[in-house]
Amino acid sequence: MQEKVHALPGGRRWVEIVEVDAAQWSRFLEEKGAPPALVAAARERDGSVNLEARPGWIYVCYPLDLTRDELRMGHFTIVLTPQTIWTQASDPLPDMDSLGDILEEDEHGFLGEIDCVHVAGALGVASMGRTVAGTLRTRDAVDKLAERFEDDADSVHYSEIRALRKRVLYLEAIAEDQFYAFSSLMAVDLTPFRGTSQREPLLRRLQVDRHVSASLDRLERRVDDLLQGYEMHQQRRTNSRLNLLSVISAIFLPLTLIVGIYGMNFEQMPELAYPNAYYICLGLMGLLVLLMLLNFWRRGWFD
């Protein structure tokens, strides 16, 4: 287990805990004097949203999008005390390093009074970067697939659309859990953890959540429209094939009737004695086929 410490104004600290498993993380919090409920939450984390508030302590854990080649969910944990904030993520978050540098380099107080609630809100926005990036990647994928569908609908496969819809629903679930975590945090008495009465840092985080959720809602509707368009296209293809089969069947019905009549073994069939009767019959059959094809074409069966 490694600790990366960032000094904050007012003697406060933000400590990043890296390369740690659930047992080490819970044991670390226990050594710091965390209440048993927080220690148990750290030990039993499963990536779902979890909030525990005790006097002088707040524990919040929510899922993160760690998708690379395939969907993979991680977690991010924030533990608040009046003077120290600890964070622990299942994967390194590059945005955290830049945030730490900004906070440490604010020697002249340009950021104003920074307390643990401010840092928690900033950390929430930084950790939301994974979900935002995943949403933007998914939007680009939906745009490209929609463009392909417009250009050549036959080149789009059902599995591609289903995979995109699965990704959108996955991101929606993460965004909803993160929104629930920070909206629940807003309901907690944060007075011991901040030097001001403002909740603007958390409100900014919730605004990002709402924006991402709205974007994902639009993406879900677009993917559903794409799926509906694909199903309609497949239905049109099926109908076209059935139309072709119907035309072929209709053409061969009268021909089959003629063949059936002249295939009967009657002794008296005058047509059989006519000169060139065979060629006349073939000509009539061919003319009948042409007339039927012309009729189907005029009625739009080949459109």
Image (cartoon, helix red, strand yellow):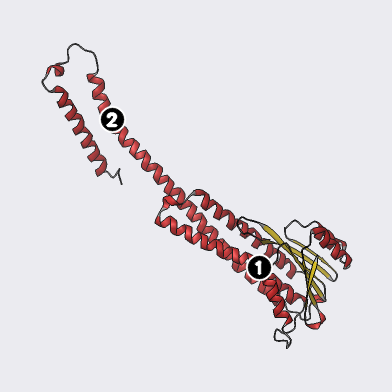
Q: Secondary structure at mark 1?
A: loop
Q: Is residue 243 above or below residue 161?
A: above
Other-residue count near label 1 (Cα within 10 Å), few / some / many at <14 / 14–19 / ≥20: many
**Residue at 73% from the left image edge and 77% from the top image edge:** 118
Residue 217 percent across, percent down from the top left: 56, 61
Residue furthest out toward the top: 267
Q: Quadrant of residue 214?
A: bottom right
Q: Quick one: 274 or 28, which is closer to the camera?
A: 28
Residue furthest out toward the bottom: 108
**Residue at 15% from the left image edge and 26% from the top image edge:** 279
Residue 200 percent across, percent down from the top left: 69, 77
**Residue at 66% from the left image edge and 74% from the top image edge:** 204
Residue 284 percent across, percent down from the top left: 17, 29
Q: Is 41 displayed left or right of 230 in the figure? A: right
Q: Is residue 187 above or below residue 269?
A: below
Q: Quadrant of residue 150?
A: bottom left
Q: Secondary structure at mark 2?
A: helix
* Amino acid identity at mark 2: Phe
* Amino acid identity at mark 1: Met
Dot 2 or dot 1: first in sequence order is 1
Other-residue count near label 2 (Cα within 10 Å), few / some / many at <14 / 14–19 / ≥20: few
Q: CA distance from mark 2 to mark 1?
A: 66 Å
Q: Are marks 2 and 1 in contact (CB under 8 Å)?
A: no
Q: Is residue 82 above or below residue 236?
A: below
Q: Is residue 130 above or below residue 252?
A: below
Q: Quadrant of the N terminus?
A: bottom right
- The residue under label 1 is 128
Q: Quadrant of residue 201?
A: bottom right
Q: Is 293 displayed left or right of 24 in the figure? A: left
- The residue under label 2 is 252
Residue 287 percent across, percent down from the top left: 18, 33
